[in-house]
Image (cartoon, rainbow, N blue to C red):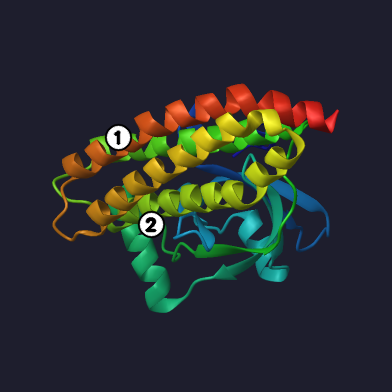
Amino acid sequence: MPIDFNQQIIDEFRANGGRVGGPFEGGRLILLTTTGARSGGRHTTPLGYLPDGGERLLVIASANGSPRHPDWYHNLLAEPRVTVEDGVFTYEAEATVLRGAERDEIFARAAEADPGWAEYQARTTRVIPVVALKEAGGGPPDMSSPGTALKRLHDAFRRELSVIRKEFAASGPGLGAQLRINCLTACQGLRYHHTSEDGGLFPFLADRRPDLAPVLDRLAEEHERIAVLLERLQHTVSDAEAEPGAALAEVERLTEELERHLDYEEEHLIPALDALAA
């Protein structure tokens, strides 16, 4: 993509906590910063990505099917240590180019979920690389306040569930492998977030704001209800015979419950967090 267009996407992404319009609107997007193989300078590129079970993200060096690998790919071959921005967190990652059967399996499931990948491969004689990005050094949330950080994290969950709902609605008669992974990865992320709140944020606030006890009790109870819905959804998408309609119904139930929960949490906890930080 042209440099000026890339910069517009980058600026919009950073200004809006990972939300952008244009061709990336409603999709999964990260900013990948690599070290120039020749210049040694830092170069940032917006890229679509695939979830891969929570341990890593996957990016595909398609370059729209051009005959040459994209520059960011050449850069990470020379220096695999990269920086990833996901709209909430910015962290260091290690890039690994996948080879052989692992690459072929992941590319196949990507093409099953989005035939555009197969079209890109058909345009070129090169084997389009698949790269795994695994976190190698965490960083704090991108935020102007603790409340902003919480809202951005919540919005990331909202966006991901919205994408998954669209994917289920557009799915064929069966559930593709990548769609199952997308859903299971989201379940894992939500479960981890709520466990972290139960063991960290909620005790922190209970100690400093005893008046919030009824709010925190309600939020903890809602975590338990959401955990049941997550378990139901995970069970459904793990069933080899599962139909998209059944999975979508579970996603809708989860989304409805989660939206109420997030709205209530933001209403009561964002002011408290920002007041404590002031």
Where residue 162 sits in the image (x, y, percent)? Answer: 40, 33
Q: How crowded is mark 2: few (under 14 residues within 10 Å), some or many (20 or more)?
A: many
Foreground residue, 20 or 186? 186
Where residue 20 sits in the image (x, y, percent)? Answer: 57, 29
Q: Residue at x 16, y 52 (%)?
A: 242
Between discs 2 and 1, the one toward the N terminus: 2
Foreground residue, 180 or 232? 232
Foreground residue, 143 or 135? 143
Q: Which residue is drawn at 61% across and 52% down?
A: 199
**Mark carried by residue 30:** none
Q: Mark 2 points at which residue?
A: 121
Q: In this view, does 11 lie above or below 108?
A: above
Q: Residue at x 51, y 24 (%)?
A: 263
Asked where in the image residue 133 lies, by quadrant, the reply is bottom right
On screen, residue 75 versus residue 41, left or right, reads left
Q: Name the amino acid type tagged 2.
A: Gln
Where residue 244 sits in the image (x, y, percent)? Answer: 20, 44
Q: Residue furthest bottom?
A: 100
Q: Name the residue under label 1.
A: 253
Secondary structure found at label 1: helix
On screen, residue 215 versus residue 176, left or right, reads right
**Numbered disc in front, either 2 or 1:** 1
Q: In this view, does 106 lie above or below 160?
A: below
Mark-to-mark CA distance, 2 and 1: 38 Å
Q: In this view, does 259 lie above or below 63?
A: above
- Residue 15 showing in the rendered view: no
Where residue 42 sits in the image (x, y, percent)? Answer: 79, 52
